[in-house]
Amino acid sequence: MADLDIARKTPLFDLHNELGGKVVEFAGWAMPVNYPAGILGEHRQARQKAALFDVSHMGQVELRGANAARALEALVPAAIDGLAPGKARYTQFTNEQGGILDDLIVTNAGDHLFMVVNASMREQDLAHMRANLAGVDVIERADLALLAVQGPMAETVVAALAPRAADLFFMESATMDIIGAPCRVSRLGYTGEDGYEISIAADRAEALARALLDHPDCAPAGLGARDSLRLEAGLCLYGNDIGPDTSPVEAGLSW
């Protein structure tokens, strides 16, 4: 337990233990690998119904400033300045040789850009942006948690609490109240299934997780199923499939 004693804990740490999660250290965080259903059971849950993942270890960042979108285009091989409000885009930070420093999702949140970056790279990404985005405020939102609901029944599960979520298309994002708390709801994910990521204040995350799990088609899933699902869907994992010596084109990410 020594590693877990020093690991950072997400707002759902106590819930993971209550649900029988096998909690280990991952990227400096105490995270559940699986629950009693097992990795295969959780994998099938996401493919057949809906699975709830705690992804609060991921970095959530706001970029604020009049030229934030244009400035970010100097760091990623994607069109950000023309991204419509409410739209999200997958892209990568690249080094001077074109290698991938990290992959991320960028959303035009209207008056700012909202980004989700990998847990293991968050400190590097923050330093990279602060050093290279002149005139842009780079704000880490450590006060937020992030929950993902993935699977063919994800819309049914999330829309039961937030009916407007059903109106979102893939790679669209909007703010809405869920269980009386303001949330950013984005229709995207990392499993190859339909799904949502919900950003919510850390102190409301457990209540939201319990409300989602109250739905008969939703069950918890851990890091093991998250990895097997993304492998089956052919999605890259930074540090395994892509890295500083791999360009986005070489990684097959030019789509």
Image: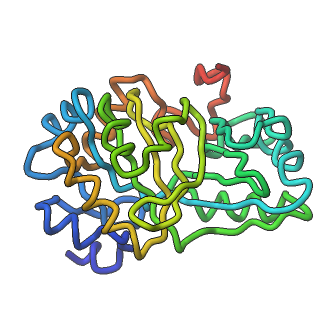
User: Left or right: 184 with respect to 89?
Assistant: left
Q: In which quarter of the image is the N terminus?
A: bottom left
Quadrant showing the C terminus: top right
Image position, residue 92 (x, y; %): 67, 39
Residue at 58% of width from left, 52% of height from top? Answer: 116
The image quadrant of residue 207 is bottom left
| Residue at far left of view | 36
Q: Which of 188 and 161 is in front in this view?
A: 161
Q: Which colour scheme is used?
A: rainbow
Can you tell which quarter of the image residue 122 is in?
Answer: bottom right
Query: Quick check: 180 above or below 108?
Result: below
Q: Which residue is drawn at 38% across and 67% down?
A: 205
Q: Vertically, is 6 above or below 223?
A: below
89 displayed left or right of 98: left
- Residue drawn at x 14%, y 61% is 19
Residue 148, position as x, y percentages in the image = 39, 48
Number of labels in the image equals: 0
Question: Where's residue 135, x and y in %?
Answer: 91, 64
- 210 to 72, vertically: above or below: below
Front residue of 140 and 123: 140
Q: Which residue is drawn at 16% across and 59% down?
A: 21
Residue 245 pos. (x, y %): 63, 35
Residue 247 lies left or right of residue 242; in this view the side is: right
